[in-house]
Amino acid sequence: MAVLLLVEDDAAIRSSLTRAMTERGHVVHSVGSALDALRAAVDVAPDVVLLDLGLPDLDGARIMPMLRSVVSVPIIITTARDDDNEIVALLDAGADDYVVKPFSAKQLDARVRAVMRRIGEPDVEGPVVVGGLSIDARTREVWLDDQEVSLTPKEFALLLLLAQRAGEVVSKRDILAEVWRLPQGGSDKTVDVHVSWLRRKLGESADQPRYLHSVRGVGVRLVDPG
């Protein structure tokens, strides 16, 4: 499962793809313009961007480098344009994949999974274990007290980073650099939202933390609740 940002100006296509990709287990945030896409990229912190080129306010080819400046995630171009020169130019400019309409949701799902596999995970020998929490980078499995926990790719990467540095306060700047590949920093809200989602899936809250402890103005620390 991935968090997808779908940028598509056609309302019917946007609705159809949102429904189809949600049915395949993804979390889909959809917008219909380039400006909304930039805002959503910061707020949502997607794992993959699905980018149409024919947007009403700015061509998708022009917004792609702007998206790259705020999020470092795979971008799949989804468009009706099938000109070979344009396809090559966009792939050379940094697009991770290019799919021409009409396409099936099944094909798009396969392409999303393919670019996610290419991202890779850190080379870790065996699961990282903290208390009753076990995170396996090779299988992408997370277990809490013998119960499997389903996480999005970004949630998994965040939890793995914190577990690998258990007991240490990891700054939000470091988290943005390691998980979102934003070495110059980004929105603290991105980290806060994902930590909140993680807490919910681990059965805790900010008021009653067990594993995830926020240090105001600094970052997050993962601890063994003992």
Image (spheres, rainbow, N blue to C red):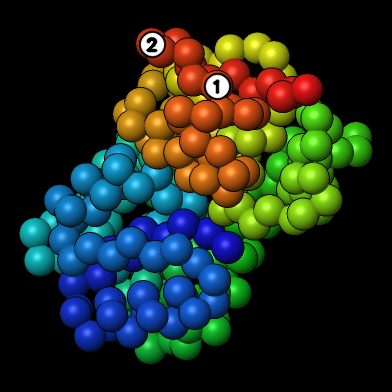
* Quadrant containing the N terminus in the rendered view: bottom right
Q: Label 1: state its secondary structure.
A: strand
Q: Residues within 10 Å of mark 2 (few under 14, many from 20)?
A: few
- Residue 29 located left or right of residue 27: left
User: Disc number at residue 161?
Assistant: none
Residue found at x 57% / y 48%:
201
Q: Nearer the viewer, residue 165 or 12?
A: 165
Q: Residue furthest right?
A: 126
Judging by the rendered image, the residue that carries numbered circle 1 is 213
Disc 1 residue type? His
Residue 82 visible somewhere in the drawing? no
User: Disc number at residue 217?
Assistant: 2
Q: Residue furthest left?
A: 57
Q: Nearer the viewer, residue 123 or 82?
A: 123
Residue 60, picture quadrant? bottom left
Q: Position of residue 131 (x, y in %)?
A: 80, 30
* Quadrant containing the C terminus in the rendered view: top right
Q: Is residue 179 above or below residue 66?
A: above
Q: Position of residue 8 (x, y in %)?
A: 25, 70
Q: Residue furthest front?
A: 208
